[in-house]
Image: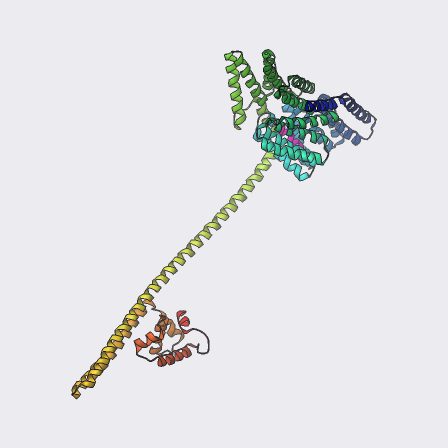
Amino acid sequence: MKNIFVKISVLVLIWLPNYYLKAQETNNIKSLEQAIGLTIDTKTKMNLYIQLINELKNNNPDRALEYAKITIEIAETENNQEIKLMALTRMADIYWAMTNYKTSMELAMKAVDLAKHLGNNIELAEAHRVIGRIYTDLGEYKLSSDQFFESLKISEKTGDNQSIAKALNSVGYLYFEQQNYDKALEYYSRSLKIGREINDPIGISRGLNNVAAIYAERKQNDTAEKYVLEAAKINIKIGQRLWEGINYQNLGELNQDRKNYGAALNYHNKGATIFEELNNLIMLSASYINLSDYYDETGNEEKSLQYAEKAFSIGQANGLKKIVKNAAEKLHSIYLKKDDLKNAYKFGMIQYQIKDSLGLEESMTKLSKLELQYDFEKLNQEEKLLQQRKDFITIIIIITLSLFVILVLLLMSRQKMKARNDRLAKQKLQDEVDFKNKELTLNVMNLIRKNEILSDISNRLMLIENEAVKDETKTAIIKIAHDLQKNTEDEIWEEFELRFKQVHGQFYERLMQKFPDLSPNDLKLCAFLRLNITSKEICKMTGQRISSLEIARHRLRKKLGISNTQTNLVTFLAQI
């Protein structure tokens, strides 16, 4: 009971000052009208007209349009294009609210052209926003999203927070219409935050109502009602009749969801009355659908049918796809309950056809939408041609740059492939050299072993010579040992030199070119060292003592010019 009392108290606080506030609003309008009559300065008078239009556009759109037309006439006479632009955007907004989309689109497109010419980005953003709202009501979400995001982009460039908040709200509304409630809440919350920061009552009330709609969709009714009541209080205070009606509509839905039918009907009727006074057909038809739901839920089938038919007629007459779909869905349900299968089938087919049409961006459109697109193209033909030229140049530049990048990438790829192939070839060659070096070293080892065996045989022959009796025998043995040793050394060296040249054919040539004073023994030593054969193994092959080999290495270093350096002899030779 306490919670209900609090809610009722809040409503009383909202409703009691209503008459006073309307009287205050009337006084403001009268004051502005009187000031216009007394003002001599034309510029001041036009600015007063703009203020008057702002006061009237939500609550008395017909009078607001009359003043807007007067303002444009004066602005054209005085050649004041800025004031003319402001009047155009407000007229476009008013005609949108009255669901006169053709006139609204014409005026909004004129405003776009003039705003671009004047460099007035605030009014340009507003004009794009109006066009986006038209396309949203017609169910053309792709076109509306283009307009809303363009409005947001322009608004952010201006830094005008009020304009940014409006654009954010419009984007949120687009997501809401497509039932993407998370994204809708994100944009609505950002809009509300800006409205609070700049203390803009219209922006705050709009943000509160829209955030409440998200919570209502999520069945968080207490939170939703809290936001709507706060919004309604602001709208009544500032005289925002359209948004006051929307608040009533939302409160009606919340109370109906709670089965609080008395309060629900009261709110539904209040909202419908306001929309009827403002001639806002889209909101009025939405109210009729809500009333149809209400009467259906409370068991009054005939009244439910009556309001659903009203909404369907408005939707069809004005090309409002979403209204037609929702009304057809309701009529289908009602006729099913009445066992009128013929009409149930008829409206069921209409419902699914419209649903498919809303979901397909390239579906066939109504005559009104085609006419609007035709007017849109006609008004912007020159601009589109210019944009096409710019796009063509941009495409040519992009293609040229792309081809250049592709060419560079191909060249780089080819270069990398060539380098890779070179590395592979070099590695293969090195592997072959390493293999042949191993093979050569192995052969050298075999030669050393062979030389050792032959030397051992020679030594044994010398022992036999000592034991021989006859001089002729001794002489023969010595000669055989000597020949065997000499032939073995020549054979070993010839075989080594042959195999070495097969692997390092140009080593001798390069060595002799750089160091022509080298002797055959020097060359032989260089070859051994090139193969990284140890001093001990060289001695075995050549029959030299280690001391003699060290002297030979020292002489070789001197001839190679590295006697007084720390350069490693083997490393030096490996680099030749």
**Image check: 335 left or right of 21?**
left
Q: How is the image coloured?
A: rainbow
Whether 329 is drawn above or below 518: the answer is above
Q: Residue at x 43, y 73 (%)?
A: 568
Q: Main secondary structure of the magenta part?
A: helix
Whether 237 is drawn above or below 415: the answer is above
Q: Residue at x 71, y 36 (%)?
A: 197
**Pick the front one: 273 or 430:** 273
The image shows residue 497 at horizontal and vertical percentages of 30, 72
**Pick the front one: 131 or 398:** 131
Residue 448 in sight here:
yes
- Is residue 127 on the magenta stretch? yes
- Is residue 227 on the magenta stretch? no
Residue 92 in sight here:
no
The magenta region covers: 125-134
The image shows residue 456 at horizontal and vertical percentages of 24, 77
